[in-house]
Amino acid sequence: MILEAAMLSVKKGQEGEFEQAFKDASTIISSMDGYITHDLHRCLEVQGKYILLVQWENLEDHTIGFRQSNKYQNWKQLLHHFYNPFPIVEHFERIY
């Protein structure tokens, strides 16, 4: 299992729109091969800051299967215009 982690900075005043768009986009990511689960968390201290955690069966399910799919284009259209700056996405493997 691989954990994808992305710190998301949503433009001020667009948090509600983003959360609704993310709800819609969740159906896209959850339909992908290799997808296990995801969680979106809102920061309590910083307005507009979120963390997205996605579990994938392996790295390629995210980097190739999802990111190179037509469905990813829909994901981008729904969500990418909310971010400033654009998030850095990193992948982690469980040690313990």
Image (tube, rainbow, N blue to C red):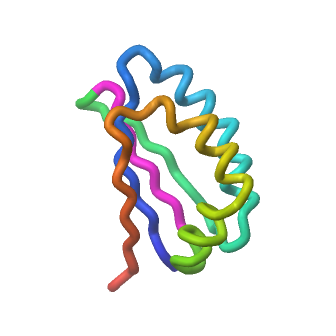
The x, y position of residue 26, in whole percent, is: 66, 46
Is 13 within the magenta?
A: no
Extreme residue in the left direction:
45
Q: Is residue 80 above or below residue 59?
A: above
- In percent of width and height, residue 18 lies at 53, 28
- What quarter of the picture does the C terminus occupy? bottom left
Residue at left 39%, top 58%?
Answer: 89
Q: Is residue 44 above or below residue 37?
A: above
Residue displayed at 56% across by 56% down:
38
Q: Is residue 52 magenta?
A: yes
Q: Is residue 66 left or right of residue 19?
A: right
Quadrant position of residue 5? bottom left
Number of numbered discs overlaid on the protein picture: 0
Residue at 45% x, 64% y: name it.
4
Q: Nearer the viewer, residue 87 or 93?
A: 87
- In this rendering, is residue 62 above or below 81? below
> Would residue 66 appear left or right of 39 to someone viewing this image?
right
Taking depth in this image into account, of 90 and 52 the one nearest to the observer is 90
Q: Is residue 93 left or right of residue 2?
A: left
Segment tinted magenta in the rendering:
47-55
Q: Give residue 31's quadrant in the image.
A: bottom right
**Most distant residue in the bottom direction:** 95
Q: Position of residue 47 (x, y in %)?
A: 31, 25
Q: Main secondary structure of the magenta part?
A: strand
Name the residue rendered at 51%, 77% in the picture: 59
Q: Position of residue 3 (x, y in %)?
A: 45, 69
